[in-house]
């Protein structure tokens, strides 16, 4: 893996959790500051919208509804941000150069290949059956094949499509 790719992964691994942490902190602060509609609006806006005509019970119901709406919106925004960050981080992989851990005997339909950099890749096409040389720690390259995903080439074999196995 090049230093540039390592730097990108490092920055992404720090940035995404920090961004979510700041988002959550900002949301908590904004909820404290704007717990109800009377604090969100200026007195002039509150009166101009006719909300001053609501009973205290009706204002409580409106504030409860706003709180639920805010929480739902926050959850949707957090999920969208996480999905976007994951998708963009995944797309940034251009080329990984590494070695296969252990011997590579070939593709059998559901082969998972572990690389020295810690990533795991599964063959994408179950119909690919490629005989491997069975040698240890073969050189390997994974590269972005555009719209079609990723391709892998292991020393002594033809290239084939792979999908990255997500670690838990």
Image (cartoon, grey):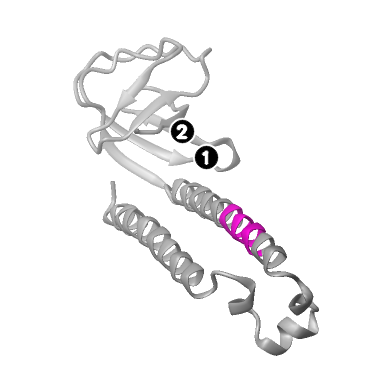
Asked if the stretch drawn in magenta spans residue 71, the answer is yes
133 displayed left or right of 87: left
In the image, residue 148 above or below residue 37:
above
Quick one: 110 or 141, which is closer to the camera? 110
Q: Residue at x 35, y 61 (%)?
A: 18
Q: Are marks 2 and 1 in contact (CB under 8 Å)?
A: yes
Alpha carbon distance from label 2 to label 1: 6 Å
Q: Residues within 10 Å of mark 1 (few under 14, many from 20)?
A: few
- Residue 67 image position (x, y, % from top left): 59, 60
Quick one: 114 or 144, which is closer to the camera? 114
Magenta-colored span: 63-72
Asked if the stretch drawn in magenta spans residue 76, the answer is no
- Residue 74 image position (x, y, % from top left): 55, 57
83 displayed left or right of 168: right
Q: Main secondary structure of the magenta part?
A: helix
Quadrant of the frame with the C terminus: top left
Q: What residue sits right under mark 1 in the picture?
A: 145
Q: What residue sits right under mark 2 in the picture?
A: 151
In the image, residue 46 above or below residue 104:
below
Q: Quadrant of residue 140?
A: top left
Q: Quadrant of residue 35?
A: bottom right
Q: Residue at x 30, y 41 (%)?
A: 97
- Residue 75 image position (x, y, % from top left): 54, 51
Quick one: 59 or 134, which is closer to the camera? 59
Q: Quadrant of residue 99?
A: top left
SS assignment at label 2 = strand
């Amino acid at each position: 893996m090049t230093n540039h790719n390592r730097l990108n992964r490092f920055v992404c691994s720090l940035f995404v959790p920090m961004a979510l942490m700041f988002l959550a902190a900002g949301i908590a602060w904004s909820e404290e500051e704007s717990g109800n509609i009377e604090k969100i609006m200026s007195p002039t806006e509150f009166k101009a919208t006719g909300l001053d005509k609501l009973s205290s019970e009706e204002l409580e119901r409106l504030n409860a509804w706003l709180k639920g709406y805010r929480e739902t919106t926050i959850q949707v925004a957090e999920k969208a941000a996480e999905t976007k960050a994951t998708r963009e981080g995944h797309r940034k992989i251009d080329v990984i150069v590494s070695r296969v851990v252990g011997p590579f005997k070939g593709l059998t339909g559901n082969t998972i290949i572990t690389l020295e950099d810690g990533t795991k890749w599964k063959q994408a096409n179950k119909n690919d059956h490629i005989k491997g040389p069975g040698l240890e720690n073969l050189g390997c390259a994974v590269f972005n094949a555009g719209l079609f995903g990723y391709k892998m080439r292991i020393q002594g074999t033809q290239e084939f499509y792979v999908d990255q196995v997500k670690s838990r």
